[in-house]
Amino acid sequence: MSSQAFIASARARATRLSSVAAIVAAAEKLRAQGVNVIDLGAGEPDFPTPENIKDAAKRALDENFTRYTAASGIIALKEAICARAATDFGAEFSPSQCSVTVGGKHAIFNAVVSLIDPGDEVLVERPCWVSFPEIINFAEGRMVPLDTEGTDFHLTADQVRDAITPRTKLLIVNSPSNPTGRVIAAPEFRKIIEVAAEHGLWVISDECYVQFVYPPGKPNSAATLPPELRERVLIAGSLSKTYAMTGWRIGFVLGPEAWVTEVTKINSQSTSNVNSITQRAAVAALTESQESVAKMLAEYTRRRDWLVPALNAIPGVSCGAPEGAFYGFPNVRGLMQECGFETSKQLADTLLYDYGVVLTGGSAFGIDGYLRLSYANSLEAIQEAVSRIGRMRQERS
Ligand SMILES: Cc1ncc(COP(=O)(O)O)c(C=O)c1O
């Protein structure tokens, strides 16, 4: 019997394990060793899934709603997704413009893979969510980063226009953004899509944090665009953050029917469908009271309002106020210099291994000199983490 080493495909070899997943694993290991670890690394709500959603899942089980469903999802859920877009954004979509996916990540994966051919250029703001470059790479597209540090992490229509070439096929926008928490103001958002449409680009609007915009800001979706612009945009939605349902794995695409059909085709040959129980729970999430969402937003606001001034009070740290999502993204170049760190990853590693604080270095998102702190953790935990960062500065500078 010959024993040959397993050699993964070129495509698999070119795919990296999520750097956030690697941090989560490192923190888990420390915790198992008894270290008091504070986790500001996780990009997921610390709240439990609301009771009414869990009740709907229990009912689905009791009713034996446990079989395959249509690859694009059950009709009641697609109708609920369309109804939410109508209620929240005054937009009319039909269920045929909707396909249910295994989370927002799967929505974006299938949307990219169903559009991009090798060598096609994809415009993405940088810093950006860790999975955009990997998904584009998987599809053999070429990511063209649009650096937003100079505009306080707000993507502009001019930047998009300047980056377009004959090979550009797709623009990905993500507002509110992970990791920066910035929101593209509605007028600029519209201009960006106008530029994309003028040049025949397609757009994915990742709206996974759309419901978490801090007052006086308001949620803004591509759904509000006029029909001639909207026909270029596929919305990638997710229930993960909005309803504290990260483990349930449920998201969707909403937009041009021809694109949605391709997404469904890929669903049908990979995941078949999102699990039937989750789909029933998602109907309850979207159609019943939205009070839990408002409560979570109020709590994130309270934490943000404590965190941002506290970070700015540390010498060498400067943090703009997140306008949405639940991430602080401070510039820590001064702190790095003072404490002798060359990269924000070194700083993040020291905070993890010597101070038990989990957070993510900016380089994971394509920019060094920053840290991402998720404030989806209790205010007490956030306060303790900031105090440990301050202690590290005192001990290392
Ligand atoms: C910007 C962004 N898009 C999409 C997702 C995907 O979320 P999920 O697959 O859990 O719906 C995430 C999760 O962290 C995210 O931060």
Image: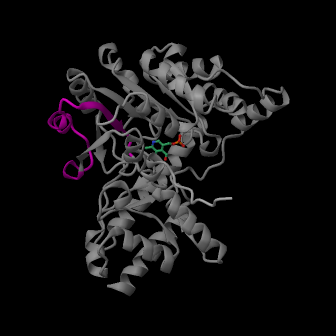
Whether the magenta-drawn stretch holds residue 306 is answered as no
The residue closer to the viewer here, 147 or 53, is 147
On the rendered image, what quadrant is the N terminus found in?
bottom right
The percent coordinates of residue 319 (x first, y second) are 32, 60
Indicate left or right for 151 with 305 as reference: left
The percent coordinates of residue 29 (x first, y second) are 61, 71
Q: How many marks?
A: 0
Which residues fall within the magenta stretch?
Answer: 149-177
The percent coordinates of residue 104 (x first, y second) are 51, 37
Q: Is residue 35 visible?
A: yes
Whether the magenta-drawn stretch holds residue 165 is answered as yes
The percent coordinates of residue 388 (x first, y second) are 46, 76
Query: Which color mode does the image show?
Result: one colour
Residue 199, located in which quarter of the rendered image?
top left
Q: Residue at x 54, y 15 (%)?
A: 95
In the rendered image of this protein, does residue 194 appear above or below residue 1? above
The residue closer to the viewer here, 13 or 126, is 13
In the rendered image of this protein, does residue 46 appear above or below residue 234? below
Q: Residue at x 35, y 19 (%)?
A: 230
Q: Residue at x 41, y 18 (%)?
A: 256
Residue 250, located in which quarter of the rendered image?
top right
Q: Is residue 91 visible?
A: no
Q: Which residue is at the far front?
A: 1
The residue closer to the viewer here, 267 or 185, is 267
